[in-house]
Amino acid sequence: MSNIDPISLQPSELLQQLIRFDTTNPPGNEAACVQYINKLLQGAGIETTILALDESRPNLVARIQGRGRSSPLLLQGHVDVVTTANQRWQHPPFQGDLVDGYIWGRGALDMKGGIAMMVAAFMRMATEGITPPGDIILAILSDEENAGTFGAKYLVESHPELFAGVRYALGEFGGFSMEMVGKRFYPIMVAEKQYCHLRVTFSGPGGHGSMPLRDGTMGKLGHVLSHLNSQRLPVHVTPSARMMFEAIAAAISFPANLAIRGLLQPPLTDRLLDLLGEQLRTMDPLLHHTVSPTIVN
């Protein structure tokens, strides 16, 4: 990897290299991956800064000076990935194989693909001598998949001056697109769903295996899990979701536009989602609070 010319490196090749670093979080161990990016940037003549709460979990920040006519633009992304444990993979998750025009591996989407594009664009701007209207800041982060304590949280709390004046940022899935009824849409994220952790405890009488106990704690737990699995929470249309669906409906033709507008009518929402099926599966969480049981002890 050290023999790669950073100037000629293509984003697809860079992505393959990044995937080959196992940065599964926990524990993360992002240092080798971050140092690899650091060497590429320095090889392109870019000054970098490494900042870390833990040496094995560093963050990288670099800046291209602009003309001062616009506020700084932040390019930010993380190199850690979620686990591959107990999963079946068609291709090895940390080899970055190129198969049938696709690069396979853990993190190809979330978000080493985004990192590869940002780093490649950043280096190209530097090597071609482009001076942007405002500064361009590149932040390569650790620990996004597990609280951000060693990554974004550490940087904004300990080094906020690095981001002074920033009004806009490009991050994960900044260019995500979707197609509907032959039209392509580019959603703009203006909000994120917030989460609430709940711990539910079921209590009841003990018993003996030789004397079956009906409606005990296991029965109560099973009933709740079955109910959550089979039922949606009530429809909840937020202003942001309403704006999105109305904009989509205005851009597509009859009768699809009526179906999209119908999603905003709570008595019709769930029936239309079921009718439209997989096509609108990603829209379901935009129109409801959601609940996901994840751990049973």
Image: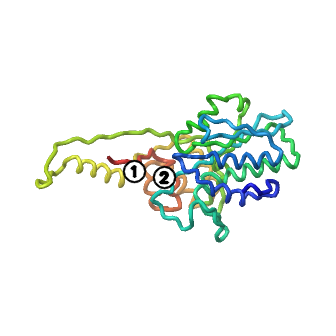
Q: Distance from label 2 to label 1 (Cα)?
A: 9 Å
Apparent side of residue 213 relative to residue 218 in the rendered image (left or right): left
Q: Residue furthest bottom?
A: 100
Quarter where residue 242 is shown: top right
- The reply to whether discs 2 and 1 touch (Cβ–Cβ < 8 Å) is yes
Looking at the image, can residue 135 be seen?
A: yes
| Residue 71, position as x, y percentages in the image | 77, 34
Apparent side of residue 158 relative to residue 137 in the rendered image (left or right): left
| Residue 101, position as x, y percentages in the image | 67, 68
Residue at x 76%, y 59% (from the top left corner): 10
| Disc sitting over residue 232 in the figure | 1
Q: Residue furthest right?
A: 129
Determine the secondary structure under disc 1: loop
User: In the rendered structure, which amino acid carries the disc numbered 2?
Assistant: Asp
Residue at x 19%, y 47% (from the top left corner): 216
Q: Residue furthest left?
A: 211
Residue at x 60%, y 41% (from the top left corner): 57
Apparent side of residue 266 relative to residue 14 in the rendered image (left or right): left
Which residue position is annotated with label 2? 284
Residue at x 47%, y 40% (from the top left corner): 195
Looking at the image, can residue 188 be seen?
A: no
User: In the rendered structure, which amino acid carries the disc numbered 1?
Assistant: Arg
Placement of 141 over or under 8, stated as above or below: above
Determine the secondary structure under disc 2: helix
| Residue 167, position as x, y percentages in the image | 71, 34
Please name the colour scheme applied to the rendered image. Answer: rainbow
For label 1, the crowd category at 10 Å Cα-Cα, with few meaning under 14, some 14 to 19 and many 20 or more, is some
Placement of 154 over or under 12, stated as above or below: above
Depth check, front residue: 194 or 206: 206
For label 2, the crowd category at 10 Å Cα-Cα, with few meaning under 14, some 14 to 19 and many 20 or more, is some
